[in-house]
Amino acid sequence: MTRAARDGARPLWLRSLGYWAFRYKRTWRSSMTETFVEPVLYLAAMGIGLGTLVDHHVHQVQGVSYLAFVGPGLLASAAMQVGVSESTYPVMGALKWLKTYEAMLATPLRVVDVLRGHLAWIVLRLATVSCAFLGTLAAFGLTRSWEAAVALPAGVLTGVAFAAPIAAFSATQEKDAAFSVIYRFGVVPLFLFSGVFFPITRLPGWLQPLAQVTPLYHGVALCRSLVLGDASLADSIGHAAYLVALAAAGYAAASATYRRRLVV
Amino acid sequence: MAPTLRSFLGTRAPAAEVTGGAAPGAPDAPHVAAADDRAADDRAAADRAAAEERAVAPAPALVVARGLVKRFGRFTAVDGVSFEIARGECFGFLGPNGAGKTSTMRMIACMSPVSGGTLRVLGMDPAIDGTKIRARLGLVPQEDSLDLELTVLDNLVVYARYFDVPRADARRRAADLLEFAQLSERAHDRVEPLSGGMKRRLTIARALMSQPDLMILDEPTTGLDPQARHLLWDRLYRLKQDGVTLVVTTHYMEEAEQLCDRLVIMDHGRIAAHGTPRELVERYVTREVVELRFATAHDQAAALPLGELARRVEVLPDRMLLYADDGEQILAEAERRGWSPVSGLVRRATLEDVFLRLTGRSLVD
Ligand SMILES: Nc1ncnc2c1ncn2[C@@H]1O[C@H](COP(=O)(O)OP(=O)(O)OP(=O)(O)O)[C@@H](O)[C@H]1O
Ligand SMILES: [Mg+2]
C-alpha cells in the first residue's frame, strides 16, 4: 500500500453515495415491488379500471383518455412517495439507530459529503423509479413524443423537491413520531388533491390557490404536459423553477440542520 | 492462533513525517522501572525495551494538546487539558463517568470542533486538515456504529471504501482482519445477532481497515466478559508491537496498567495526574496497602491508632485501608497490640488506589 493509494482521490461525496448504493445492492429485493410492480398495479387499477368508467361517462379529461391523464400524475406522485420515504426513516436511521453518519464522519468524509452523498443516492433512486414508471407508460402506449423523456428529470426533480427539505427536517428530529404526521397530513392529501386524479379546477374555488402552491401540483403539471407532449416552455420553466427553488432551499436548510446535529 | 498484523502492517509506506504546527516537544521520558517480580514476563520486557528506545530518541509527538477546551453550550466538559502522545506509545485516558474522556477522544479524532486551546494531530490542525488527518486515524467509538443489516465482511469492505481503499485490497485486508479479530467464521453473517464482544472486535477490525497511524479506542472493552476482554487486550498489545500508536480510554485499571505506557487521569474535565502507571503509583500511593476488616465498628475504631504507622489511612464502612511501604509490619503491630482484625491482607498498591485517591470514592453524578 502506498500513501497515495491510501488517501485516495475519489470525491468524498461519491464515497458516501457508494455506501447507500452498496447497501441497496444487498437489500434491493425488498424494494423491487415499490419500483417496478407498483407502477403497473396503479396504472392497471386507476387507468384501466377507473378509466373505463370515467371515459364512459366523461369521454375525455383535458382532451385525453383518463389513463393518459392519470399516468403521468402517478409518475409525479410516485416520485413524491420515494422522495419522502427516502428522506425520513433512512435519515433518522443513519443519524440515530445505525449511526451511519457518525461512522462516516470518523473517516475522511465531512458533513457536506455525508449530506451530498445521501441526496445523490435519493436522486439515483428517483431516477430508477421514474425510469420504471416512464417505461410502463410507454408500454401502455401513453407517451406521445420525445418530450416524454424529459419527464424523467422532471420526476427526479419532483422527488428531490420533497426529499431535500424533509431530510433537513428529519435531521432535527429525535424520534420518528413526526414522520407519520408528514404522511397523514402531507403526503396523503397531496396525493389526492394535487391534480393527480382530476384537474384542480374541479376543486372548490378557495382550495385551488392552495393546491397550486403545493410542490406536487407543479410536479404533476410538469410531468403530465411533458408526457402528453403539450408542454409550453414558459409553463414548464415556471414549474421547474418552483421545484428547483424548493430543492435548493431544502439543501441549504439541510446543510444547516445536518451541521447542527452532527458537529458537536 | 491468529496471524500477526505484520503481514500487512509491515508493508506500509513509512509514516509521513510530522510537519508544521506546534513544534512537538520531547515527550516525558518514560520511567523505566527496576526489575521486579511483576516485570518478569515478555510483555514488560518488550515494554522496557521500547521505553528505553524512546528515552534515547524521543519520537515526535503525534498528538499535541495545549489548554484544550470543549464546551457544550455553557457547560465545560473539557477544561484546559494539555498532553502529548508520542509515536508508537499506548496512551491512556482514565477518569470517572463524565470526566470528559469521550469529548477529548472526539476532538482528537477530528469529529468534534475544539472550543479553546490548541490541538495538533499528526502535525496538522483538525480545524483545517480534518479530512487529511482522519484518513490516517482509526476510531473505535464508545458506542458501536456498525451497520446491523449488513454482514460482518460487508461492514469492513464498505468502511474501507470511505478511505478509497481499492475493492480488491479491501477484501484481502478484511479477510486478514477477520482472522485477527477471530470472526472469520461469522464473515457472512449479519451483524445484528452478534454478541457485544464480537461487535466490539468487529469495530476494532473496522478501524484497522485503513491501516491507521493512530488508533483511538474509546472504552474498547467495556461490557465484555473476561475472555473477550483478554482477547482484546492481546490484540491491542499486538497492534502496539506492530508500531501502531494507541490512545485508549478505559475503566479497567488493570487494563491501563498492562497496556498503557503513559496515561492521564481526568476528573471534571481536567487532568488530575499524568505519568507512567508505575510513576503514578509511586507518586500518589505507597508501595503496599493493608486492608483490615474488623468484626464490629467498635473494634475498627479502637484500631485507629494503627494509622500512625501508615502514611495514609482510609476508613470505609466495611474496612480500613492503611497505605504504607511495609504492610507486614503494620499487620504484625496490630497483632501485637491485640487489635486482631477478622481478616488482614497486605497487597501491592495499584493504579486503582491512585484512581480512587484522586477522583474520590463516591459517585459524583
Ligand atoms: N453532545 C453533548 N451535549 C451536551 N453535553 C455533553 C455532550 N457530550 C458530552 N456532554 C457532557 O460532557 C461531560 C463529559 O462527557 P464525556 O462523554 O466526555 O465523559 P466520559 O469521560 O467519556 O464519560 P464516560 O466514562 O461515562 O463515557 C458529561 O457531563 C456529558 O454530559
Ligand atoms: Mg465516554
Image (tube, coloured by chain):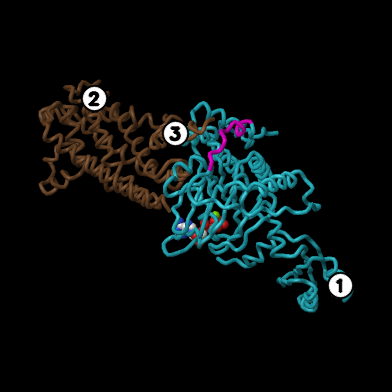
Chain colours: A brown, B cyan
The residue that appears at 73% across and 69% down in the rendered structure is B318
- Going by the image, does B152 lie left or right of A96? right
- Secondary structure, mark 1, is helix
| Residue annotated with mark 2 | A137
Mark 3, Cα crowd under 10 Å, few <14 / some 14-19 / many 20+, is: some
Disc number for residue B138: none
Horizontal and vertical percent position of residue B170 = 52, 30
Q: Is mark 1 within 8 Å of ligand 1?
A: no
- Going by the image, does B134 lie left or right of A46? right
- Give the quarter of the image for residue A38: top left
Which chain does tag 1 point to? B
Q: Nearer the viewer, mark 3 or mark 1?
A: 1
Disc number for residue A23: 3
Segment tinted magenta in the rendering: B7-17
In the image, A38 versus A236, the foreground residue is A236
- Secondary structure, mark 2, is helix
Q: Is residue A143 magenta?
A: no
- Give the quarter of the image for residue A199: top left
Residue type, label 3 = Arg
Residue type, label 1 = Glu
Magenta span: chief secondary structure: loop
The residue that appears at 31% across and 45% down in the rendered structure is A166
| B348 is higher (above) or lower (below) than B339 | above
**Marks 2 and 3 share the same chain:** yes
The residue that appears at 39% across and 41% down in the rendered structure is A114
Horizontal and vertical percent position of residue A30 = 41, 32
Disc number for residue B333: 1
